[in-house]
Amino acid sequence: MSKMEIKTRKQDKAIIISVRGRMDAVTSPEFEKELSELMAREAKDFIIDFSELDYISSAGLRSILATTKKLKEKEGKLLLSSLQEAVKEVFEISGFSSIIPICESVDSALSQI
């Protein structure tokens, strides 16, 4: 069964979103909804902390890409941080790592906002 937890917190000028578990066809709409709601409240700089994300599917990648496009329209930023090896590999193979900045840690992502 697909399970994902999302926790958000504000730090400096960014919203840090910690995603835990699996991001797939079942759970990625929840991720998109959460980020859309945050954007509706004028948030525009996001750091996605994937240190506890075990798996991401193409549906999860699409959600991230859709969110990135919405943020570009608002002149916002989306950075990814702390990717586990298997998740990082998916981003590299799909070519998404060249579209979306990937940082080693939340702190290094914060320094880019």
Image: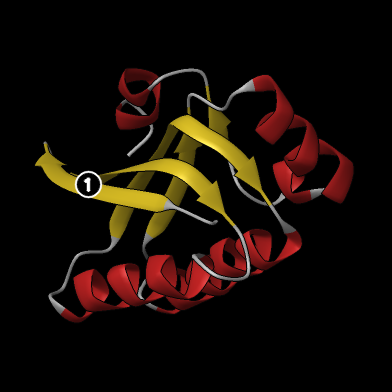
Which residue sits at x=11%, y=44%?
10
Q: Is residue 10 left or right of residue 54?
A: left
Which residue sits at x=56%, y=68%?
63
In the picture as drawn, the residue positioned furthest to the front comes out as 1
Q: What percent of the width, then of the height, locates residue 9?
A: 13, 44
What is the quadrant of residue 49 in the picture? Answer: top left
Q: Relative to 74, is 91 above or below?
A: above
Q: Is residue 110 left or right of residue 80?
A: left
Which residue sits at x=67%, y=34%?
87
Quadrant where the image shows the C terminus: top left
Q: What percent of the width, then of the height, locates residue 93?
A: 88, 41
Q: How many marks?
A: 1
Going by the numbered disc 1, the residue's amino acid type is Lys
Colouring method of the image: secondary structure
Instruction: Depth check: give the residue in front, 62 or 29.
Output: 29
In the picture as drawn, the residue positioned furthest to the right comes out as 93
Q: Relative to 72, is 83 above or below?
A: above
Q: Secondary structure at mark 1?
A: strand
Q: Relative to 30, is 92 above or below?
A: above
Residue 96 in view: yes
Quadrant where the image shows the N terminus: bottom right
Instruction: Depth check: give the residue in front, 52 or 47.
Output: 52
Instruction: Depth check: give the residue in front, 86 or 91.
Output: 86
Which residue sits at x=56%, y=74%?
66
For mark 1, what is the residue?
Answer: 7
Q: Residues within 10 Å of mark 1 (few under 14, many from 20)?
A: few
Q: What percent of the width, then of the height, locates residue 33?
A: 35, 77
